[in-house]
Structure formats: structure tokens, C-alpha cells
Amino acid sequence: MVVALVLSGVTVAVAALDKKEYRVFIVSDDNQKDKFVELRNGFTESLDKQLAANSAKARYTVFDTKSNKANVPAIIQAIKDGQPDLIAVINSSGVFADTNITNKLTDPKYRFVSENCIPVQSGTAKTWDKPGGNVTGVGVFIQYTSIMKLAQLINPKVRKVIFYSWDSVKPLNDFFQSEIRAACKATGIELAEFKLLASAEDEFDFLATADRRGPDHFILPGVDVWVHSDGSPANITVEGAEFMRKNIRNIPLYSYDEAAVKAYYPAGTCVIWYDLGAQMADKAMKVLAGANPGDLAWEYPRKYNLMFNTAGARLIGLKIPSNLLTAAYRVYTDFDGHYIGQKN
């Protein structure tokens, strides 16, 4: 039997839902961090709405791995005992949950929808186009082509990009390198340097050196370094933003994350975490309606917000065209969170 299923306002023909209530487990690597909360809320609220439109509902059970292997056995056992209809996974940048849970539960009776930026590199999917097995999902990082095109719109003279990331996230860095090279080819931007760094001090030294490059350069960060050279944790959101506000005077940095634009970065094409959760829910509906997860292509984020920080731009003498500011979702006017534009 085929019925009409409502997915984010679009009606498509799929196999009929065969239950009135679905058991949905959510496994997250951090239940407290803002982006994880936004992703989870986007997923549950969108799934609830779509199920209700099809005379069904979900009953949720939420787990937090805390990226700690000691918590894994109990979560795996709970999944085996609970036999949920669907498992939604929200990963840290190190894709702990998929590596330690999803990848170990390969029986097709377990059906996963994952948020994972490196599904192939982490062994969760065979390919992006056809993941295979019992899992499908969405990525965290927007395609870097969009950020590079934004850099060109802000300054048509840019020719070269500098990329850096934390050296401890090797699978993610392999993904970054592939994505950056593809974006460079698509936009005609030259990859001037791809640098992996070991400590926050390395990151600050690297940024200071990069700031002496010519006006035809810009910087794209991957993952900031969250540890000091002595091994102690680094609060890079605070320390990094403070360093850049005091020391970077020539070269712009662009980001995929609103938090970075709010703190300092002049501009970004930023992931909408809530909508990424809703994108997961759309895939979940297809799975609950009978689709094989492994046949559903992994997806990049389908939307992003254009954001600017005019205070960050002024520090480096960067002029952001007025038409871009007008088109922005949000324009931060200082480093204290004040902005012009839309509210969440």
C-alpha cells in the first residue's frame, strides 16, 4: 500500500506507516552543549509534527555518551533490550557515538539516522551516495564552496585560502582536505596552505603569521585546538576570540558556525543546527515508512544562514558590501552578542 506522507510541507508517495506510536531512541555525545540541544529540538519537534500529520506519535528515550567509553555498554544494552523503531545519533566532531555504538549494531533490525560529518571516514557509511547497511544521515559542515564564494563577493581580489585544523582529528582532517580542494577547484581559489596544529599556542602563532599575508588571502578554520601545549584544556571560544580581537589586523576569517561570527569572525555561511535536526527528522520519516536507511544518500546541510560581524570587519579594515548586509539573516554589531536581523 502507498500513501501520501507529509515531509516538511511537501507531500510524497511512500509506504504506509504501520504504527500509531514509535519508540525513538536519541543517542547524543553531549546533551548540554547548545548545538546538540538545537539539533535534538529540531529533530523531535519536526518529527512530532510530521507524525501527527499522519495520525502517529513518537515516544523518546535520550542517552548521553559524554564521549566516554565507560557509558557505551549500558547504551548498547538498552538499545538491544528496547528494540526501538529508530535510533537518532548526534555526534561530537570525533563521531564518538557512531564509532562506538552505530558501527557495532549492524543488524538491520536497528535503524539509524545519524548526524555525522565524516560518515565514510568513520566507517559508518560506505559512500555518501549509498551508505549501505542500516544507517543514513546528514553532515555538519556545509560545502566550503559557499564560504569561498562569499569571500569572493566580499573582496573580489581574493585569490588564496589558508586552512588550519587540530591535528588530533585525523579522519575529519582527511574530509576537510578533500572538501577544500573540491571547493578551490569550483571557485578558482588557490589552496595556499593546509596546516595541522597541536596546541592553542600553535594556533595563535599560526594566525599571527598568517595575518602578515597579502590582501589576496583569507582563512578558513576547520576545528580549533582545544588543548594548551602543557596538556591543559583550552577554552578556545573565549581565548581564541580574545587573541584575534587583539592581534589580527589584516586577514579575514570566515566560518560555518554562528558562535565564531558572534565572537569575532567578520562573516560566515553558518549551519542552522535546528534545521539540521529537522533534516534528520525528514529522513527518519522515510525510514519509519519503510525505506532502507542504507539506500538513502547522506546529505549536506540543506540550508545555511548568511551572517556578519561588522565590529570584526572594522578591526581588519574589511568593507562588507551593503547588499550582503541587507541580505544577511543576522548582523552582529559588537562582540557582546548585539545584532540586527532575525531572531531564532
Image (tube, grey):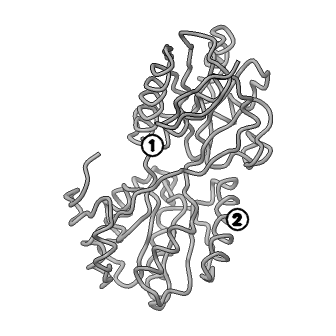
Which residue occupies 44% across, 90% down?
A: 215
What is the total number of numbered labels drawn onto the structure image? 2
295 relative position to 314: left or right? right
Label 1, on which residue? 275
Q: Is residue 77 above or below residue 150?
A: above
332 relative position to 159: left or right? left
In x, y percent, where is residue 226? Answer: 48, 54
Amino acid on which the number 1 mark rests in the picture: Asp
Q: Which of disc 1 and disc 2 is earlier in sequence?
A: 2
327 relative position to 133: left or right? left
Amino acid on which the number 2 mark rests in the picture: Ser
Image quarter (top left, top right, bottom left or bottom right) of the N terminus: top right
In x, y percent, where is residue 61? Answer: 51, 16
Image quarter (top left, top right, bottom left or bottom right) of the C terminus: top left
Numbered disc 1: secondary structure:
helix
**Marks 2 and 1: which is nearer the front?**
1
Which residue occupies 55% across, 77% down?
A: 162
Please tell me which residue lies in front, 295 or 162.
295
Q: Quadrant of residue 13?
A: top right
Which residue occupies 48% across, 36% down?
A: 8
Q: Is residue 91 above or below residue 160?
A: above
Q: Is residue 13 above or below residue 1?
A: below
Label 2, on which residue? 178
